[in-house]
Amino acid sequence: MKNALEIKSLKKIYEGGKQALKEVSLNVAEGDFFALLGPNGAGKTTLISITCGLVNKTEGKIIVQGHDIDIDGDIAKVHIGLVPQEYNADIFETVENVLYTQAGYYGISRSEAKEQIDMLLTKLSLEDKRKVQTIALSGGMKRRLMIARALVHKPTLLFLDEPTAGVDVELRHEMWKYLAELNKSGVTIILTTHYLEEAENLCRNIAIISNGEIKREGTMEEVRGGKRLEDIYMEIIKEAGGSQEPVLSKI
């Protein structure tokens, strides 16, 4: 099976000597719904940021849909969509203009982008907010807008960095349904979340990272080994000597 993402011996050492990633290797198959779990500071966001070209790596190789980011970085980026942890769009732009601007970054004209944007606004229940400035959106609507923005250029690999943090239960379930449909259509999805039941409900394969190292990897069933995912997660974090924020499993 073809891999959508291949990471080989990835290292990241920041100025001052902090090593955020230590020889991380990871393969994510095309069409997978993959969970990347770990406590705050484990290296998840650093790994994603390097893959998306936002942070420079120290060593290692990353291949996105067959394209080495060091050789074909521009092509690799076209395949990637990113939903970041924090809302980072212009708060004074309207919802639809945020999406049209994003399309423009990829050389997509307004006329070409219209059909995709109309579909995303409908699917993510934002159609009635099309002309609204994003400063007026609720937290949940901003999350949905970030998902729409990440998908406007039709990426084949989507990173979701804690996309439902702070979102109410009803909206979270709506987002799950849409993401499952998106994955079924062929988009490979990599999810980070502190809602462990979210990972169990959505994802087929999983890696748990702590202190910059992959501690466990495999199918959800293999990693759980007949136990609760929360118990496995806690065991790994304790073995690594890391700190542990609350695991929010009741969703």
Image (cartoon, grey):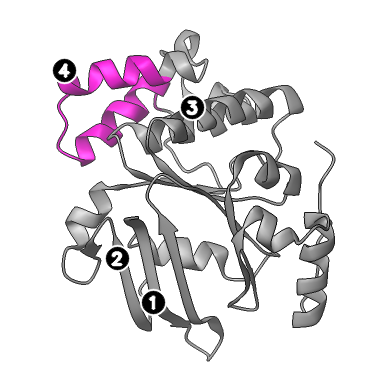
Q: The disc labelled 1 sits on which kind of residue? A: Lys
Label 3 environment density (alpha carbons within 10 Å; few <14, some 14–19, many ≥20): few
Q: Earlier in the sequence, mark 4 or mark 3?
A: 4
On residue 63, the disc is 2
Label 2 environment density (alpha carbons within 10 Å; few <14, some 14–19, many ≥20): many
Q: CA distance from mark 2 to mark 1?
A: 9 Å
Label 3 sits on residue: 181
Contact check, label 3 and label 2, Cβ < 8 Å: no
Label 4 environment density (alpha carbons within 10 Å; few <14, some 14–19, many ≥20): few
Eyeballing the image, is 91 above or below 82?
above
Residue visible at 24% across and 56% down in the picture? 76
Q: The disc labelled 4 sits on which kind of residue? A: Ser
Left or right relative to 144: residue 61: left
Residue visible at 25% across and 33% down in the picture? 103
Label 4 sits on residue: 111
Q: Earlier in the sequence, mark 3 or mark 1?
A: 1
Q: Name the image quarter holding residue 221.
A: bottom right
On residue 8, the disc is 1
**What are the residue bounds of the magenta stretch?**
93-120
